[in-house]
Amino acid sequence: MGTGRRGTRTSTLSALAVPAFSAALVAAMAATSTPAAAQPPMTPDGGADDAVMVRILGIDGIAGSLSHPPGYQGTILDGPDRTIPAGGADYLSATVSHLRAGAENSVLLSTGDNLGGVQPEAVLNRDEPTLQVLRHMGVAASAIGELDLVAPSAATMPEHGFPYIASNLAPGDDAPITPFPYLVIDVGGIKIGVIAATTGSENMEAPPPLYGPPTPAPPPWHPEHRPLQESFDAATRALEAMGVNSVVGLLHIDAVHRQNDPAACPEEIAEMPELREVSSSVDALFVGDSGGPATCDLTDPTNARRPVLSPASHGRSVAVVDLLIDPTTGRAQREQSSTYNQKVHHDITPDAEVTDLIDAATASAAENDTEVFGSASEKVSREILPSGESALANLMADAQWEATRDEGADLAIYNPDSLRTDLPEGELSYRDLHAVQPYGDRVQIATVSGDRLRDAFNAYIDDVGTRGIAVSENVELDIDPTRPEGERLVGAKIDGTEIEPGREYKVAANEFLVSSEWGAAPLTTLTSEPEWSGLFDIHTLAEYVRSHETVRPPAVNQRLLDVSAGS
C-alpha cells in the first residue's frame, strides 16, 4: 500500500498567523497518499443535493506510542466481552489513510498529549519520531495537553509542522509557546473553524522529563485561564465575522472514564455540563484526556443535536464526524451528520513507511540509551512467592510511595502482574527500567475511606498468587487464607496504626488499578475521581533508582502476613 497522505486541498488562516508556521503547515498537508485497505467507510444519509461532506477525524493522547502499546493501553473492545489489539503508529496511520480515502474532503485534528509518554523509541529520540508520524498523517492542528509541554518540545513547538490552539488561554511573559486562539481551515472550498480549550493545572506544569540528567522539570507556563463558555463564544463570534459558519471544538479536559467500547457513551462524558453549555455555534466536539473512547449525541444550549466524541488514547481509535455543509451558507447540517469511532485494529495492512520509521527510531534509541540511573546490587526478582509478596513489586510500591508522599499519599499499592521481567543486576539504563514496566501508567492518588481501603485489600488478597497486591513498606496486612473470599483480611496497619474505618486515606496507585480492567474491585468505584500525580510509573522507578544510587531487593514475607497458623 502507499504511505503518504491523501490530498485535502487544505490551507490555513489564523488571527495569529506566523509565516514560518504557515509554510510548514502547508507543506505538511500538501502530500498525497494511496488509501489503506480496510472496512468500507460510513457516510451520512440525506441532506441537500449540493451539500458538501467534510470528514473531521480526531485522535487523542498518542503520547509517543509508536509501537503497539502493551497491556490495557493496547486494546479495545470489539463486541461484548471481546477485547482485540489496537493501536501502534503504523496501524493508526493506515487507518487514517483509509478514512481519508472514504471522503473527498477531510481534515485530521488532535485533542492533545501528542508527545511525552514512555516508549523508548520516542523518549530517547526527544519526541522527534512522534512528530514525524504526526506530520506524515497530516495533523492540521492540535489542542494543548500537559504532555505536549515536556522539554525540550516546548522550545521547538513552532517546528512541529502544525499549530496548537487554545482559545481559553492568554499567554503570559514566560509562555514557552504562543497558541492560536482559533484556526480557519479550507477543506475542498469549505471553511471550517477550529477552536480549542485546555483545562487543568493553572500553571500548565508538565511532568518531569523521562530522560537526561537529573534536571528540574520544564519551566511552568503561567497563562491566564479564561472561562470556557466565554472563550468559545468570543472565538465563534470572531469566526462568524470572517464568514466562517461551521466550527469544530477540541477540548482537552478531565473526562476520564473506565469503559473501552468505542460505540458507547459513558456517563462521565454524557453528564459533563461543559459539553452541553459551550457555544451553540460549535457543531461538533472532540474530547481529549479521557483515556477511553466515547461516541455521544448530546445537545447544545438551543437543544439542537451536537455530536461529542472522544478518541481512545494511544492511537487505539480515530473519532469520525462526517459533517454535511451547505456550500452557499457554509453552515453544517448537524441532523444529517454521521459519527462513529473507528477502531485501529490489526487486520489492516500497516503503513510501511511508518513501520520503517519505528524501526529506525528503535535502533536510534538503543544508541542513545547512555544515561545510567543507578545500579542494582543483585537481580530483583518479580516472582510472586507463596506468601503473595514479590521483591520487585515491593520495590515498585516503595518507589511510588516515596514519589508521592510530599503530595500527601499515606501509602502505595502495586499490582505484581504488571511486571514484565526482573530488574537486572548491575548498571541500570532507561531501557532496563522500561523493560520491567512498559505500560506507561499514570500514578494516581485516590482518596478513600478506611472501610473502602479494607474492602480493596480483601479483593486484592483473593488474587494473591496470580495478580495479587503489593503494598509500600509502611503497610502491614494480616491475612487468614482459611477464611472465605472477601473476608481474609484480619488486620491492616499503616505506619504501625490500625486503619480507621471512618478516616480518609490517600492511596498512590497505577491507573490500571483504578480502571475497569479490575472490574468490581473497590478502587474502581470511587466516589470521586483520583488525581494524577503528574508522574508515570517509570518516573517513580527512575527517581527511586537515581536517589538510592544502588538498589537492593526489599525484604519479603513482612508485609502480607499469614496469621492462620496461630489461629
Image: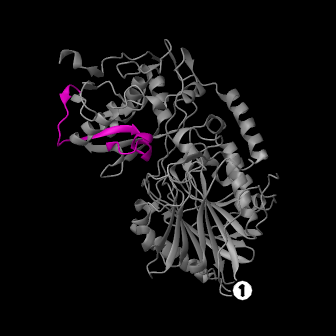
Q: Is residue 52 left or right of residue 318?
A: right
Local SS, label 1: loop
Residue in view at x 78 percent, y 46 percent: 353
Q: How is the image coloured?
A: one colour
Q: Position of residue 1 (x, y in %)?
A: 82, 51
Q: Nearer the viewer, residue 563 or 394?
A: 563
Q: Nearer the viewer, residue 442 or 335?
A: 335
Q: Is residue 233 left or right of residue 473?
A: right
Quadrant housing residue 397: top left
User: Residue 182, can we see it?
Assistant: no
The magenta segment is 495-522
Q: Is residue 516 magenta?
A: yes
User: Residue 118, can we see it?
Assistant: yes
Q: Nearer the viewer, residue 123 or 565?
A: 565
Q: Position of residue 368 (x, y in %)?
A: 67, 29
Q: Circle 1 sits on which residue?
A: 49
Residue in view at x 20 percent, y 25 percent: 496
Q: Position of residue 384 (x, y in %)?
A: 42, 21
Q: Nearer the viewer, residue 201 or 335?
A: 335
Quadrant housing residue 163: bottom right
Say which amino acid is labelled 1: Asp
Up-down relation of residue 177 to residue 89 (above or below): below
Quadrant housing residue 106: bottom right
- Count of numbered badges drawn on the protein: 1
Which quadrant does the C terminus fall into? top left
Q: Residues within 10 Å of mark 1 (few under 14, many from 20)?
A: few
Up-down relation of residue 75 to residue 79 (above or below): above
